[in-house]
Image (tube, rainbow, N blue to C red):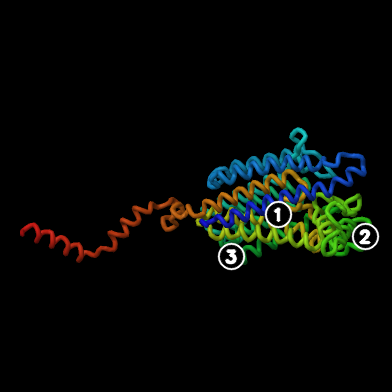
Amino acid sequence: MKKGQLESHILVLVTLGLTAFGLVMVYSATSAPAALGGGDPIFYLKREAIYALIGVALLMVASRTDYRALRFLAPVLMLTSLGLCLAVLALGQQVNGARRWLGVGSLSFQPSELAKISLAIWAAAYLARRPAPKTLKELARPIGLTAGLFAGLILLEPDLGTVIAIGIVLGAILIVSGTPLRVLAAGGTIAFGLAMAAIWIEPYRRARFFSFLNPGQDPQGAGYQTLQGILGVGSGGWLGVGLGHGVLKNNYLPEAHTDMIFATIGEELGLLGATLLIAAYVVFAYAGLRVALHCRDPFGKRLAAGLTTLICGQALINLAAVLGLAPLTGITLPFVSYGGSSLIVSLASAGVLLNIAGQRGKTRAQMPDRSRGDGRPRAAVARSRRGARSTRRPRDVRRVAGSRRGAARS
């Protein structure tokens, strides 16, 4: 098996498997409540299927397009994401008090999802051609300032979960780039302080945080969703009550098809189903990090690490929130939760990872020659000729020349 083929096969199987499983669980979580309310039982399934088809098409295109082109498209993606984040604040659809979506016909798009992958591509491109930040000042400019600008706009929507995801992705790229731990710790401390300030100034975020610390204090209010999620995961037992037979999704578990879909999975498929789902994300992380580890291109290495962390980091945060191990942030479960923007971006990210896995063995000759200081690749043939000349000693040259003159006299 050629280099990258094993990781590619794993990524394809896990990605498509999770997407198909997500369609099944979205239908299971929404069909019964819709039927009880007199609605269309397959309404959410049809919309999610449309997003899945768009996402799979993008996955195929991304897997067949050289990922290095993204390095030059990074500024365009950043400006587009910035413009959309500004537009959603003025023109976005307001749902549950938040402006996070732009309507496109009957469908909607969440610009903050595009901002995640745009920042990952930009940070990977920037750090691939420059030394890793060695001080807090180098970290702040321009990475910290750029991330802070996007974080401020996204917090105005408001959407703290996406801001946390962006911080995790940038942290992973900085680690791969060789940023010292003391610098990362200092930057992380500042980011944590700003996050706590953002939680404190918003009453609903503050209520969620305190309900996480003690959900039983307000079981019918701020702690209701956390308690129902824990109850859903724990009530399934070993094998669950059966697919489609869950009870909590019927007007008991808020957001059963989006943020809390893991609780529905735990109730209907039990510990076995929940464990297999977690194992799928572990396998995805294993394959994605192997792609990053073996990629010889600095940009590809950083981008693979960032995209893998983007998907698996969000999964970790979502699972921790449902299990009551972290505050609720609104982060969806990649590939599985209902959410068109998240699904499309996750599938596109998987397509880029597939291309990096297929291209990683072809990047040796394109790595920059850092000893030249200009980042341009040095031709392998020219380097070997110079090496050949440098290894021939002057005495050997005179000996060869003398033997040629003796042969001419004879």
Label placed on residue 104: none
**As displayed, is residue 397 above or below residue 128?**
below
Left or right: 390 as drawn, with respect to 11: left
Q: Which residue was labeled with disc 2?
A: 218
Percent across and percent down for residue 141 are 60, 53
Q: At which x and y percent is residue 116?
A: 67, 49
Q: Is residue 316 left or right of residue 359?
A: right
Instruction: Name the outermost residue toward the top.
Output: 105
Q: Amino acid at mark 3?
A: Pro
Residue under the point 60% across and 48% down: 352
Residue at label 3?
A: 180
Specify the quadrant of the image occupied by residue 87.
Answer: top right
Q: Earlier in the sequence, mark 3 or mark 2?
A: 3
Question: Which residue is under mark 1?
Answer: 165
Q: Does dot 3 land on a helix, a strand or a loop? A: loop
**Where is residue 233 shown, x and y percent of the image?**
84, 60
